[in-house]
Image: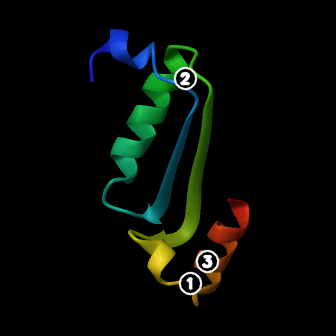
Amino acid sequence: MPEDMIAKLPPTIVMTSEFDFFCRDANCFATRLESKGRPLDFYSHPGTMHVYEYFATEESSKYAHAQL
């Protein structure tokens, strides 16, 4: 996404998990938002994997859900 578009984005929530193959991309996007002064809530949930939302019985997923 071009930098001028990043600067115009509304307040954003970025969520990732420790063992997510998109974790690096989520971190990079959050960094870009912060560099443009955009309001941002960033959550990186330790001990979780990609699509952790579907594994609500796991303790790490319960913790992540509680943070929302």
Q: Give the residue pinned by disc 1.
A: 56
Q: Quadrant of the C terminus?
A: bottom right
Q: Residue at x 39, y 35 (%)?
A: 28
Q: Position of residue 7 (x, y in %)?
A: 45, 13
Q: Residue at x 49, y 24 (%)?
A: 33
* 12, 63: nearer the viewer: 12
Q: Which mark is residue 34?
A: 2
Q: Position of residue 1 (x, y in %)?
A: 27, 24
Q: Residue at x 58, y 62 (%)?
A: 45
Residue type of the residue flagged with mark 1 = Ala
Q: Give the residue pinned by disc 3.
A: 60
The mark that comes first in sequence, 3 or 2, is 2
Residue sticking out furthest to the left: 1
**What is the spatial separation of the Cα atoms under label 2 and label 1, in whole angstroms?**
30 Å
Label 1 Cα crowd, 10 Å radius (few <14 / some 14-19 / many 20+): few
Q: Position of residue 47 (x, y in %)?
A: 55, 72
Please state if 2 lies on the left or on the right of 50 as rendered.
Answer: left
Residue sticking out furthest to the right: 66
Tag 1, which secondary structure?
loop
